[in-house]
Image: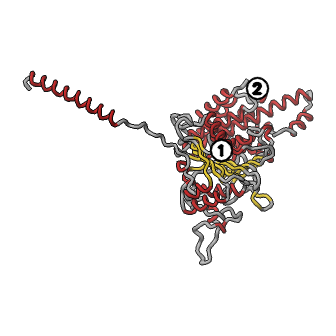
Amino acid sequence: MTTRNDIQRVLWKACDSFRGKIDSSRYKDYILSMLFVKYLSDVTKEMRERYARQYEGDERRVERAMRRGRFMVDAESSFDYLYERRTDPEIGQRINVALSRIEEHNSGKLRNVFRAIDFNSQVDFGDVKSKNATLRNLLEDFHDLDLRPGQLDASDIIGDAYEYMIANFASDAGKKGGEFFTPAKVSELVAALVKPRENDRIYDPTCGSGGLLLKAYRRVPGGKVAVYGQELNAQTWALCLMNMFLHGVDDACIWQGDTLSNPQNIENERLMKFQVVVANPPFSLDKWDSGFLSGAGFDAKGSKREKMTASLDPWKRFEYGVPPSSKGDYAFVLHMLNSLDAETGRMAVVLPHGVLFRGASEGKIRRELVELNLLDAVIGLPANLFYGTGIPACILVFKKGRTRDDVLFIDASGDGNYEKGKNQNLLRDEDIARIVRTYEARKKKVDKYSYRASRDEIRENDYNLNIPRYVDTFEEEELVDIDEVKRNIAGIEKELAQVQAQMAKYMKELGL
C-alpha cells in the first residue's frame, strides 16, 4: 500500500532534484504538475486493467468504457510513456506535448491548466544538458510511486499530499508563499464561521491554490455545494484547478483574471450572488485600481485619468466609498459584499488590522458598513500566523439580512490562544473551537476575550473598530505594599553598613 508518508518522501526527493537550480516558488509548479500527471496515469492504468478483466480482453468495449470515465489519458501522454523516454534529448518538449494532449482530451475540466508551465524552459532549466539531467531525475523520482486508487491507504491521500506540499512550498517561498496559500487552520476557522449548507454557492474571489474553498466545501456532507473562485496569477490558478480535481471537485468553476477590474462572476449581466463568501485577499494591495485606470481614457479636460472614481466601475461596487489606491483591502470587501446573497449571505474575510481604524475614505466605508448593519463580528488573530508577514490579522464576518443591532468583538491574539512556533505560530483545534463557540454564543462579555458592542457604542468610538477599544485585556499588576518595601530597604541598608564596617576593619589590619 502507498501511504501519505510514501508520497511526501518522494515529493521531497523530487525537490532535491531542483534545489540550488531553480527557486522554490517556480519549481513547485514542475513537481506538482508531475505528481498530477503520475496520478492521472496510474488511475487510468488501473481503470484499463479493471475493464480488461470485466470485458475479457475485448479492446473495443474497453475503449468505450474508458471514454465514459472521469478523465482520459492516452498512451502518449502517460507517465510511463515519458519515463521510457527519459533520456531523450527532447524530453522537455515531449513532456510539454503530453501535457497539451491531457488538456485536449479533458478540455471540459482541465482546459489551459498547464499553459503557464514549460518543461522546456531555458530560463528555468538552463542549457540543454542541465535541463535533461534535471527532468530525467524528476521522472526517476516519481517512477516507483504507485498512485493507483487500489494501492492508496486513504481515499483522499493524493489531495491531502498535494495540499501538504503547497503548504511547505509556501513556507519555503517566504513572502511569495502568502500569495497562494492560507494556513490550513486559518482556513478551517474561516469556513467554520460561515457555516456552509447544502445547495449553497461558495465563492472565493482571491482563491490562490484553493485551500479556503476546499475547507468550506468539506463542511457540507456529500459536497452538495457549488464552488466558484477567481485567481489573478496564472500559475496559482493552475494549482487551484489541479487541487480541486485531486480532491474530487471536478465541477468547480475557477476563473483566471483580476477580480477587481475584471470580475468573472457575472450572471444575467450582473454580479453573481453567493450564499457563502470566504477570502484571504492580498494585504493592503498597492495600485489595486490600475486595471480601472488603464482603460479609463481621458477626463473632460483631455488629461489621462490618474484617480479612481466610483463611476469607473461598471458594477457599482464603490458607492459607499473608493478605497485609497495604496490599500486595496476594502476594494475586495466591497466586491464581496456586492456578490453576497441578499437574504442568507454569509462572508468571512481575513484582513490586516489597519482596516479597523484607518481614516479618510476607509473610515467612510467602515461607517457605511456598520450603519447598514452588515458587520457581524471582528475577530483578532495571533501575530505570525501567515507566510511572508509577521503582522497580526483579523477576520471580519459580514451577514446580509441581519436582525441584530450589535457587533461581536473577539480578541484571540493573547498568550494561551495559540501554539507558539519557532518560525510561525499555529492555531490549534481548541483555539478554533473556542473562537467559534464564542461567536455562536454571542455573550455580552467574556472577560479579557470578547465583547458584544451596540451600534451606539461603535458610533461613540467614531466607527473605530480597533479591538482593544471594546475588549479589555489589561492585566492588573499586583498591588505593592509600600510599608513592606520600606522595611526591606531598611534591612538592606543595615546589612550594607555591617559589611562596610567589616571591610574597613580588614583594610586597617592590612595597613591599607
Q: Which mark is residue 151?
A: 2
Pointer 1 or 2: first along the chain:
2
Secondary structure of residue under mark 2: helix
10 Å crowding of disc 1: few (<14), some (14-19), many (20+): some
Marks 1 and 2: which is nearer the front?
1
Name the amino acid, label 2: Gln
Q: Residue 218: x, y in percent?
A: 74, 39
Q: Residue 232: x, y in percent?
A: 66, 52
Q: Residue 458: x, y in percent?
A: 58, 55
- As rendered, which of 134 and 451 lies closer to the eye? 451
Name the amino acid, label 1: Arg
Q: Which residue is mark 1?
A: 442
> How far separated are the C-alphas under marks 1 and 2?
47 Å
Q: Is residue 129 left or right of residue 205?
A: left
456 up-or-down from 451: above or below: below
| Residue 124 visible, this angle | no
Secondary structure of residue under mark 1: loop
